[in-house]
Image (cartoon, rainbow, N blue to C red):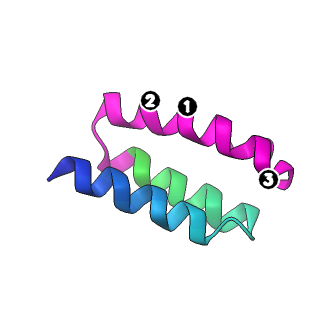
Amino acid sequence: MSRLVFKYTKKVLKKVTFNFYLFKKELKKASLVLLPHEYEELKIWVENYINKHPHLIGVL
């Protein structure tokens, strides 16, 4: 079940890439819902994702 939430969170983050503040808000929500090790994995994913979308630098 938890893995589904992780995948859903990534899907949502990809959809709100256009807006820094929405992206940050969804990332905050993810920190409350995901397990600690999943959130750490998500942070690594976000760091790599930011390379493709430089307007998101500073979101972490």
Asked if the residue under mark 2 is in contact with the one under mark 3, i.e. CB atoms within 8 Å, the reply is no
Q: Residue at x 63, y 61 (%)?
A: 23
Q: Residue at x 73, y 44 (%)?
A: 50
**Percent position of residue 41, x then y:** 44, 32
Report the Cα–Cα distance between label 3 and label 1.
15 Å
The outermost residue toward the left is 1
Q: Is residue 15 above or below residue 37?
A: below
Asked if the residue under mark 1 is in contact with the one under mark 3, i.e. CB atoms within 8 Å, the reply is no
Q: Please tell me whether residue 36 belongs to the stretch shown in magenta.
A: yes
What's the magenta region? 32-60
Q: Secondary structure at mark 2?
A: helix
Q: Residue at x 33, y 28 (%)?
A: 37
Which numbered mark, 2 or 1, is in the foreground of this view? 1
Which residue was labeled with disc 2?
Answer: 40
Which residue was labeled with disc 1?
Answer: 44
Is tag 3's residue or tag 1's residue first in the polypeptide sequence?
A: 1
Task: Inspect the image, locate mark 3, and give the three-letter code of the amino acid beneath it.
Answer: His
Tell me the chief SS of the magenta region.
Answer: helix
Q: Secondary structure at mark 1?
A: helix
Task: Inspect the image, locate mark 1, and give the three-letter code of the amino acid beneath it.
Answer: Ile
Q: Secondary structure at mark 3?
A: loop
Which residue was labeled with disc 3?
Answer: 53
Query: In front here: 51 or 2?
Result: 51
The outermost residue toward the right is 55
Asked if the residue under mark 1 is in contact with the one under mark 2, i.e. CB atoms within 8 Å, the reply is yes
Which numbered mark, 3 or 2, is in the foreground of this view? 3
